[in-house]
């Protein structure tokens, strides 16, 4: 049985490798072990500061995705989720726009992409945040929204 590794004060490996696609769960967790440096960085440098500021749990929609899981859900082949560099989340009871605005304007966090996405019934469903990773500096701190059809850089 695989050990559930603590990545930061409030985030663990199992939480960031969970999937509703149960047939991929074990594979997802096995492959996720190959990216532990990124997992720790994502949890400590992005997710934990957000959780600390809002003092509420982040509900993770998608963290790490193995290649097969990413393909099954129609994710981009270049998705940072496949490198354990991205997480989609929301916080119960806190407006996504408020979270998004705090991250973008007041947080001083260093991210690769910050995207308000997952549009359902005319409203976003989650925030995507990623590490800068191996991107050149000019490709970091990108802020976008997704209207259900296309990404729009802000």
Image (cartoon, rainbow, N blue to C red):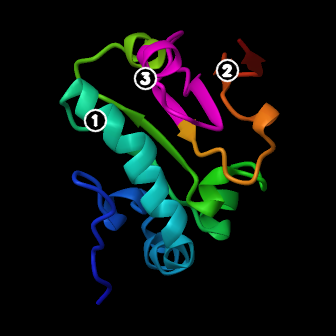
Mark 1 vs mark 2, foreground winner is 1
Q: Specify the quadrant that holds the N terminus.
A: bottom left
Tell me the number on the disc at residue 107.
3
Residue 22 falls in image quadrant = bottom left
Classify mark 3: residues with Cα within 10 Å, few (<14), some (14-19) or many (20+).
some
Q: Eyeballing the image, is 95 above or below 54? A: above
Q: Is residue 99 left or right of residue 63?
A: left
**What residue lies at 48% left-to-right and 25% top-to-bottom?**
108
**What residue lies at 46% left-to-right and 28% top-to-bottom?**
126
Residue 96 falls in image quadrant = top left
Residue 13, image x, y percentages: 35, 66
Q: CA distance from mark 3 to mark 1?
A: 12 Å
Tell me the number on the disc at residue 51.
1
Residue 35, image x, y percentages: 56, 71
Which residue was labeled with disc 2? 144
Asked if marks 2 and 3 touch (Cβ < 8 Å), the reply is no
Q: CA distance from mark 1 to mark 2?
A: 21 Å
| Number of marks in picture | 3
Counting residues from the N terminus, which is met first, the one under dot 3 or under dot 1? 1
What are the residue bounds of the magenta stretch?
Answer: 102-128
**What residue lies at 54% left-to-right and 62% top-to-bottom?**
38
Counting residues from the N terminus, which is met first, the one under dot 1 or under dot 2? 1
**What residue lies at 67% left-to-right and 67% top-to-bottom?**
67
């Amino acid at each position: 049985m695989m050990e559930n590794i603590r990545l930061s004060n409030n985030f663990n490996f199992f939480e960031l490798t969970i999937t509703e696609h149960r047939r991929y769960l074990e594979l997802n967790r096995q492959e996720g072990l190959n990216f532990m440096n990124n997992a720790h960085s994502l949890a400590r440098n992005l997710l934990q500061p957000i959780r600390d500021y809002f003092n509420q749990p982040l509900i993770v929609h998608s963290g790490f995705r193995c290649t097969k899981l990413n393909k099954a859900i129609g994710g981009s082949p270049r998705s940072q989720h496949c490198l354990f560099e991205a997480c989609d989340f929301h916080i119960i009871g806190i407006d996504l726009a408020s979270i998004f605005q705090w991250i973008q304007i007041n947080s001083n966090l260093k991210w690769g992409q910050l995207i308000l996405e997952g549009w359902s019934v005319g409203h976003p469903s989650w925030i995507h945040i990623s590490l800068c990773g191996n991107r050149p500096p000019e490709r970091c701190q990108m802020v976008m929204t997704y209207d259900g059809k296309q990404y729009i850089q802000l």
